[in-house]
Image (tube, helix red, strand yellow):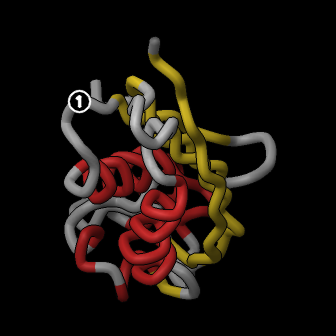
Amino acid sequence: MKVTISRKAHFNAAHRLYRKDWTFEKNDAIFGKCNNPNFHGHNYDLTVSVTGEIDPETGYVMDVKFLSDIIKEDVENQFDHKNLNLDVPDFKDLNPTAENIVVVIWNKIRKRIKPEFELEVVLYETPRNFVTYKGE
């Protein structure tokens, strides 16, 4: 029997959507106000879900405290109150779109949980705009 556990988290970060190899005009046409050279910020909400078999000894799929610690160390501590373009090495050469951010987060968490668990990360850039990644 498989069960999914989930943990919510939050971080605030600034970013600018643009490609270094495009002109300002092309970036502006594609990314609009998100191409602001002075950056802009979001209050990101995150839901991390782990699916697996219930351990008969503990009754857990996974200790939620352990999942919470992973999110704190690998996401919140690295992204919160940062400029993603300037302060987070993962985005040195990667446009920090919500799609790319969720994949980076998924990859960080994936390294820390058992391979037999399924992992899904949902990242809310705004209450109405969100992305989901399951490693596919």
Q: Where is residue 74 in the image (x, y as percent from the top left)?
A: 36, 71
Report the front residue among 78 and 87: 78
- Tell which of 99 and 9 is nearer to you: 9
Please tell me which residue lies in front, 129 or 1: 1
Which residue shows up at 65% across the image and 49% down it?
124
Q: Give the amino acid type for the residue marked by disc 1 in the picture.
A: Glu
Q: In this view, does 45 lie above or below 40?
A: above
Q: In this view, does 62 lie to the left or right of 104?
A: right
Quadrant hosting residue 78: bottom left
Taking 56 as reference, is 98 left or right?
A: right
- Give the x, y percent position of residue 135: 29, 32
Q: Can residue 15 be seen in this view?
A: yes
Residue 109 in the image: state x and y as whole percent. Answer: 33, 55
Residue assigned mark 1:
116
Q: Residue most toward the front?
A: 57
Residue at left offset 79%, top offset 41%: 128
What's the residue at 29%, 69% (across, down)?
Answer: 91
Q: In which quarter of the image is the C terminus?
A: top left
- Splitting the image into 4 quarters, where does residue 52 fall? top left
Residue 25 can be seen in this image: no
Q: In this view, does 66 lie to the left or right of 40?
A: left
Q: In this view, does 63 lie above or below 21?
A: above
In the rendered image, the vertical position of residue 15 relative to residue 123, given as above or below: below
Residue at the right extreme? 127
Is residue 79 found left or right of 103 in the rendered image?
right
